[in-house]
Image (spheres, rainbow, N blue to C red):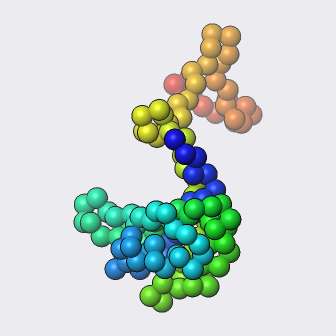
Amino acid sequence: FRDFTGSRVFVQGIPPSASWQDLKDHFRVAGTVVFASVSLDQNTGESKGHGIVQFETTEMALTAIAIMRDHPMDGNTLYVREDVKPDENADGRPNIRKTKKPSDDQSWKCADEENAGYLSDSD
C-alpha cells in the first residue's frame, strides 16, 4: 500500500467534454502524471466538472497547485488544491463519524443553557 498524501490534487472547472486522458495530458506541464480521473454523474454519465490528478511526487503536485490556474483548459479556469482523502475503513468505505452516546455519568447539555428553560422536556 502506497500513501499518496500530498501527490494528488483535486481539480475544479474541468470542461464538460474533457476525458481523463485530456486531463492527464493537460496537467503534464506540472510534472509526471501517474493517474487522472474525471468524476461522472452516476445517472447521466456526464462530467461533474471536477476530478483528481496524481503526480509522481509531492513537489509536482505543489507545482500544479501553483501554476495550473494560469493554464486554462479549453477556456475554463482550473481551480487546483491538494486532494484531502476522507478517513476510510479497512474495506475502503468512508468512515462515517457517529455521535457518541453520553455515558451514565454524563448527560446532554444545551449549548445555550440560559435559553434551555424555554424548551419543553420533550425538546
Q: Is residue 82 left or right of residue 38?
A: right
Which residue in the rendered view is the most extreme toward the top?
A: 104
Number of numbered discs present? Answer: 0
The image position of residue 90, as x and y in percent, is 47, 32
Q: Is residue 26 left or right of residue 41?
A: right
The image position of residue 71, as x and y in percent, is 57, 85
The image position of residue 84, as x and y in percent, is 58, 53
Q: Is residue 123 left or right of residue 46?
A: right
Residue at 42% across / 34% down in the picture? 91
In the figure, residue 15 lies in which quadrant? Answer: bottom left
Residue at 60% across / 31% down in the picture? 119
The image position of residue 64, as x and y in percent, is 62, 72
Which residue in the rendered view is the most extreme toward the bottom?
A: 75
**Residue 91 makes an appearance in the image:** yes
Q: Quadrant of the C terminus?
A: top right
Which residue in the rendered view is the most extreme toward the right?
A: 114
32 is higher (above) or lower (below) than 77: above
99 is higher (above) or lower (below) than 86: above
Foreground of the two, 27 or 76:
27
Residue at 67% across / 16% down in the picture? 106
Foreground of the two, 37 or 1:
1
Foreground of the two, 29 or 66:
29
